[in-house]
Image (spheres, rainbow, N blue to C red):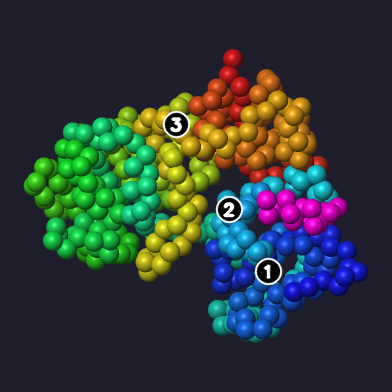
Amino acid sequence: MTENNDEIKKFVYIVQASKETTVCKIGITGNLERRLEEYNSMTGKSADNYYEYLFTCEVEGAIQVENDIKKEFADLRENSKKEMYFYNQSLFEKYVEFIKSHKLFKKEITVKTTKPEKVVKVVKKEGKTLKDRNKTRKDLMQDARKTKNDEFYTRYEDVEKEISMYPKSIWKDKCVLCNCDDAVADEEKRNENNTSAFALFFLNNFEKLGLKKLICIHYGGGLDLFGSGGKAYVFTKDGVEELFKKEKGFTGSFDDPLSIKILNEEADIVCTNPPFSRCIDYWDIVINSKKKFLIISNFTNCINTAYIKYFAKKQVWAGYNRVDWYYNQKKQLVDASGHWYTNLKVTNRPKWKNIKFMKIDEIQEKNKKFDDSGILVVYNNYIPTNYKYPFAVSAYPILSGILEKGYKIVQLKRYTPYFNGKENFAKVLIQKED
């Protein structure tokens, strides 16, 4: 796709195809309406795989902005010579945050778009059209992101990667509890198709880690991804002895009385991926149990009001790694922004190097801004070293370990900046400790 030579490129856009939701395209143009038409008329493209803008804005120098985007997000480009970038909600927010904080950014704009007629006909089969429902494709994407879907299953490689970062000594003579839907097959049949990643990892490494006991609780509701049957059970490996036990009336949920009894009376370390939609309840139960834990939860928990108190009180902090890919109920890879969280000791955190400590006057203007309330908002992992007042940061500095570098959370709820009356992305307020 090309522009006329005499046409000035002054718009930056993020566009996404309806059937390619793990990537987006970031580009520049002088005519947003025509560019979208070009995307939707590409030869060889399926008629129902239509494109819609996720974000559009006007800038003073589009070529410079595009080059800066390529440089900033080089590791997130699917191909170094193409405009395609990896996509999930957190990454999208990061792209937009970078663009809107750029010194050449002028204003965000809205482009009215309509999808191809053939796609409208497909939607009619479902009942009301998007027009009838007063929704756009972008609305549907946002609705889909808000839909609660607990069917995210962790990959073995992600469990192995995170646990390898901690000294083996922390597991020695400990009882590990995997208390969220951990299916376990019979010993001679175990593999990644019939045993959950957490259970399989600890079973494979039981002797190597020096575990005393492993307890896995299989949830009795929902889909039976691993073919373990629909009933809840407790699997216990105690030395060489293995036992599958089903209790009448036991649901297998983490808040079932039996599950809580096992947590309180037997577990030393909890390690699992709790259902995302019930994380508030799960965190409350596990953290108040005073047990050690290593769990996966949403990437943005650290700037969510329900969880900020735990980070502020140093009851939890980020583990080492992000987790962006999971298996769904069809055992297909899907993206959902997650991160490891723990109260185990983290040393020599690699992400510390991502934090850019700098005196406030040395931080580029595009990376700092005062909002309508006079609160300093900093972007792209910049941290002002000589600023004594509270300032707002995104999830990235928190997950990179800023709270371990002499800074504290000063407000136990998320902070939402406003610029010229317009709401910006959620942040958290931190301040340099005395």
Q: Position of residue 10 (x, y in %)?
A: 84, 59
Q: Earlier in the sequence, mark 1 or mark 2?
A: 1
Q: Is residue 279 visible?
A: no
Residue visible at 37% across and 47% down?
Answer: 161
Q: Position of residue 275 (x, y in %)?
A: 39, 51
Q: CA distance from mark 1 to mark 3?
A: 43 Å
Residue type at the position of mark 2: Asp
**Which disc number belongs to residue 75?**
2
Q: Earlier in the sequence, mark 1 or mark 3?
A: 1
Residue type at the position of mark 1: Glu
Residue type at the position of mark 3: Asn
Q: Position of residue 358 (x, y in %)?
A: 67, 28
The part of the chain drawn in magenta is 57-71
**Which disc number belongs to residue 348?**
3
Q: Is residue 65 magenta?
A: yes
Judging by the rendered image, the residue that carries numbered circle 1 is 52
Q: Is residue 328 magenta?
A: no
Magenta-drawn stretch, dominant element (helix, strand or loop) = helix
Q: CA distance from mark 2 to mark 3?
A: 23 Å
| Front: mark 1 or 3 | 3
Q: Earlier in the sequence, mark 2 or mark 3?
A: 2
Q: Nearer the viewer, residue 272 or 149?
A: 272
